[in-house]
Amino acid sequence: MKLLLIGSGGREHALAWALAKSPKLTKLYAAPGNAGIAEVAELCNLDTADHQAVIGFCREHAIDLVVVGPEAPLVAGLVDDLEAAGIKAFGPSRAAAQLEGSKAFTKGVCDEADIPTAGYGRFDTADAALAYVREKGAPIVVKADGLAAGKGVVVAMTLKDAEEAVTACFEGSFGAAGAEVVIEEFLEGEEASFFVLSDGTNALPLATAQDHKRAYDGDEGPNTGGMGAYSPAPVLTDALIAEVMRTIIEPTIATLAKRGTPFKGVLYAGLMIGTNGPKLIEYNTRFGDPECQVLMMRLKSDLLELLLASVEGRLDQTTADWRDEAALTVVMAAKGYPGSYDKGTEIRGLDTPATDDVAVFHAGTKRDGTRILANGGRVLNVTAVGTTVRQAQQRAYERIRDIDWPEGFCRTDIGWRAIARES
Ligand code: AMP
Ligand code: GLY
């Protein structure tokens, strides 16, 4: 099969690496890709926001399946347009991707299906939103409704912070994404992520993970897209996974099917595990980045078969097999990230080939002749497998010692919570 993979991050490098192992794959293209993806795929110069251009490329190169990595093209309806042109595509339709594209949409699904989640109000004027936060008091969570590149959420510990967040939203800090605001009850507990694959009707559990969103050690500093992750998440026991499937995932899939907008693709549930059982914080409609990197290290099944089964509605006849070991990934970022940082600095020490146990996935990199240059904020994902999270962590940091990139940094404590549970 000939595939086109859309995206350019560490998530897409991990997907490309896993897809390249499939005996079914004959050719992999990636748009736009990065220097790591180029080791297993042919990069193509394609404007992925131009759906007609993507369709034209697929026809010209006889592409059998398009795999969409990031959320923006999903919310923009790339899968709908490809399918309308008769081209198979993995990922949800525009309508189903609203589970990620609109927080108010997801809250509506939760109401309809009685899914456990934080209590909330939704508002399209600042006055009404301010009255609500004053009535409820802090701590409270203020969220821009739409996609805001992970920056649209303020967990306000004081009423003043909540009021400021509401005002900023309606003053246009997040553009159109902030025209409506969802205000939520503050949930306490431990966060974990759960990934399932759906074909619109069936939901196949994949795996669990936890990530570190803060930039610096000790989970301090500004929020980022994620500085590291590990899988499995020890907090999500088999009993809790069964509860999450029954109370959260299955009702969501059933509700979208009933509405005539079935969800196909990866459903990524952000969960809060508190004393009253698991609650849904949010949905994403794609693999997480960097969670995908640890999932792909643990996946034993053929990824291409799994994605095809989702597209073709065969997940009831499909299983996913996982290595029992833990996988852990450490993000190396350009100094200054998530604020401003330099691009174009050289990274050395990347020549050791990936194995089944240790792999360096590229995120923001590009090739310049024989040199690999940093080309983004999050640049590398150093990923390792171990019998324990501690061993996976040791192996990842061992690999990092061989990487020569003075302009980069990483956290030194990825996995600390899981390691504390192990000892
Ligand atoms: P979201 O983009 O909705 O996942 O929110 C980003 C982060 O904000 C989450 O990963 C949580 O750490 C935090 N968060 C969001 N909603 C809540 C909530 N209702 N209670 C506590 N923390 C929350
Ligand atoms: N790591 C968080 C995300 O992919 O949204």
Image: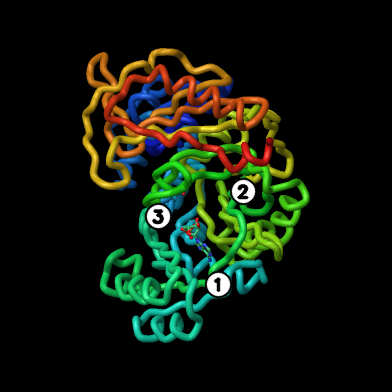
How crowded is the residue under tag 1: few (<14 C-alpha within 10 Å), some, or many (20+)?
few
Circle 2 sits in a helix, a strand or a loop, which is it? Answer: strand
Of tags 2 and 1, the one toward the viewer is: 2
- Within 8 Å of ligand 2, the CB of disc 3? yes
Chosen colour scheme: rainbow
Q: Is mark 1 within 8 Å of ligand 1?
A: no
Which-is-in-front pick, marks 3 and 1? 3
Task: Using the image, tell me which numbered label, if any, was put on residue 133.
Answer: none
Under mark 1, the amino acid is: Gly
Mark 2 / mark 1, whichever is N-terminal: 1
The amino acid pointed to by label 3 is Gly
Residue 72 can be seen, yes or no? no
- The answer for how far apart the CA atoms under marks 3 and 1 are is 21 Å
The percent position of residue 315, horizontal first and vertical second, equals 68, 43
Q: Residue 394: x and y, percent?
A: 55, 25
Q: Residues within 10 Å of mark 3 (few under 14, many from 20)?
A: few
Read off the residue under disc 3. Answer: 150
As drawn, the label of residue 194 is 2
Disc 1 is placed on an element classified as helix
Q: Nearer the viewer, residue 197 or 132?
A: 132
